[in-house]
C-alpha cells in the first residue's frame, strides 16, 4: 500500500510542528525519516497512524483516509513508537496473543500469526520468558512482533534501534530489511549510518518542513554540487602533472595533498566523469596512476548542512 501525505499541518500552540508537507511512500519502499529533535518526525508518524489528528491536510494509506475510514486504515498499519509499548510482567507469547486479540484476529488465525512473527523476529527461544527478563534487543524484537502480528501492509517504526548495542543494531537492521521487501516502511532514526544501510530513500525534515528527499547518492550530489577525487600520479615532474590536471575539461580546482608523494585532490563537474578524464590524460602523458579515490560527502555532513537555521527552505 502507498502512503500519501498531502499538505499536512499540525500546530502546538504558537509552534508549527509540521508545516504544510507533502510526500508519497510507494509500496515496498523503505523510507528513512530524518531530522533533529523537534523537527516534526514523530508528529508526522503519529498523524499517519491516526494517533493524533492534524490541523489540516490529508493522509491516505492505500485507498483509506485518516478522516473517512480511520479504523480500516489502522488495520493496515503496524506501529512501533519510540517508547516500546510492552507489558513487562507478561510472557512474550501471552503478550503477543493479547495484542492479536486487540487487533481482532480470529482465534483460528491467531496461532498461525503467532508462529509467523515469532519465527520472523527470532523469538522462538524467548517466547515463554517474561518480557521484563529480556535484553533491550529482544524487547525491540517483541515490539516489532506486536507491530506485525496482524499482517499489516504498512510499518511505521519510530527510533527502533534506540539504546541498542552495535550487535543488536545489526540484528534489527537485517530484520527491517527483510520485512521491507514485502511492506511499505517508514523508519525514523538518529543513527545516520543505520538509515543509509537500511533505507531505499531518505527524507530530511527540519522545523516542520521537508528540506531534502532522495536516495543517498542523490542527496550527496545535491549537497556537494561537485565531484571530488584524490589521485597519486608517478612518472612526471610535479609542476607538469599539476598543470595537466588543471587543463582537464570539467576540473574546477586542483590542490596538493602531499607534494613529496605527488598526491593531489581535484574538484569538478559531477557530470564530467573526472576519473575517466584523469586516466586518459595520464595515458597520453605516459604517467602511472597509483591512487584514484572518489571522495563522497558523508550523510552526517549533509544532515548538518540541511538542518542548520540558514538551510531551511521556504
Image (spheres, rainbow, N blue to C red):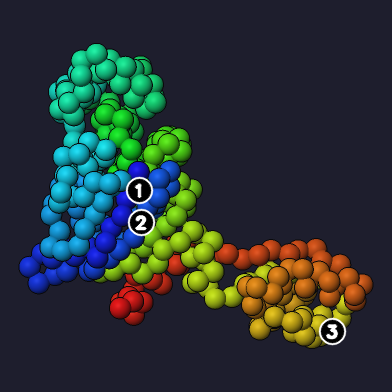
Q: Looking at this view, name the residue that lies furthest to the right.
A: 286
From where the camera sits, is residue 117 visible? Answer: yes
What residue is disc 1 on?
A: 2
Residue 10 is situated, as x and y percent measured from the top left of the image, at 16, 63
| Residue situated in front as seen by the camera: 168 or 79 | 79
Identify the mark nearer the N-term, 2 or 3. 2
User: Is 290 placed left or right of 77 in the picture?
Assistant: right
Q: Position of residue 258 (x, y in %)?
A: 71, 74
**Circle 2/circle 3 CB separation < 8 Å:** no
Residue at left offset 54%, top offset 69%: 221
**Badge 3: how crowded within 10 Å, few (<14), some, or many (20+)?**
few
Which mark is first along the chain, 1 or 3? 1
Which residue is the site of mark 2?
24
**Which residue bears the numbered disc 3?**
240
Asked if 81 appears above or below 59 in the picture, the reply is above
Give the residue displayed 66% in from the left and 83% down from the top: 252
* Mark sitting on residue 273: none
Q: Is residue 88 above or below residue 53?
A: above
Amino acid at each position: 500500500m502507498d502512503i500519501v501525505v498531502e499538505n499536512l499541518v499540525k500546530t502546538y500552540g504558537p509552534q508549527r510542528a509540521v508545516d504544510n508537507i507533502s510526500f508519497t511512500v510507494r509500496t515496498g519502499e523503505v523510507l528513512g525519516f530524518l531530522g533533529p529533535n523537534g523537527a516534526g518526525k514523530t508528529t508526522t508518524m503519529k498523524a499517519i497512524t491516526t494517533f493524533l489528528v492534524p490541523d489540516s491536510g490529508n493522509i491516505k494509506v492505500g485507498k483509506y483516509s485518516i478522516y473517512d475510514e480511520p479504523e480500516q486504515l489502522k488495520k493496515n498499519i503496524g506501529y512501533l513508537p519510540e517508547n516500546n509499548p510492552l507489558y513487562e510482567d507478561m510472557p512474550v507469547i501471552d503478550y503477543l496473543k493479547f495484542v492479536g486479540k486487540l487487533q481482532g484476529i480470529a482465534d483460528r488465525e491467531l496461532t498461525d500469526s503467532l508462529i509467523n512473527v515469532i519465527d520472523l523476529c527470532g523469538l522462538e527461544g524467548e517466547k515463554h520468558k517474561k518480557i521484563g527478563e529480556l535484553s533491550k534487543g529482544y524487547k525491540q524484537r517483541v515490539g516489532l512482533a506486536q507491530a506485525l502480528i496482524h499482517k499489516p501492509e504498512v510499518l511505521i517504526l519510530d527510533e527502533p534501534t534506540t539504546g541498542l548495542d552495535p550487535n543488536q543494531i545489526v540484528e534489527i537492521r537485517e530484520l527491517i530489511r527483510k520485512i521491507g521487501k514485502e511492506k511499505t516502511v517508514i523508519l525514523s532514526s538518529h543513527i545516520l549510518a543505520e538509515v543509509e544501510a537500511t533505507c531505499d530513500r531518505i527524507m530530511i525534515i527540519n522545523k516542520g518542513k521537508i528540506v531534502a528527499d532522495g536516495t543517498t547518492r542523490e542527496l550527496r550530489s545535491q549537497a556537494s554540487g561537485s565531484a571530488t577525487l584524490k589521485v597519486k600520479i608517478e612518472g612526471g615532474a610535479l609542476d607538469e602533472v599539476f598543470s595537466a590536471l588543471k587543463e582537464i575539461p570539467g576540473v574546477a580546482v586542483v590542490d596538493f595533498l602531499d607534494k613529496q608523494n605527488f598526491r593531489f585532490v581535484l574538484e569538478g563537474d559531477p557530470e564530467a566523469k573526472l576519473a575517466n578524464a584523469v586516466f586518459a590524460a595520464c595515458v597520453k602523458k605516459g604517467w602511472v596512476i597509483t591512487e584514484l579515490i572518489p571522495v563522497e560527502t558523508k550523510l552526517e555532513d549533509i544532515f548538518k548542512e540541511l538542518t542548520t537555521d540558514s538551510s531551511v527552505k521556504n
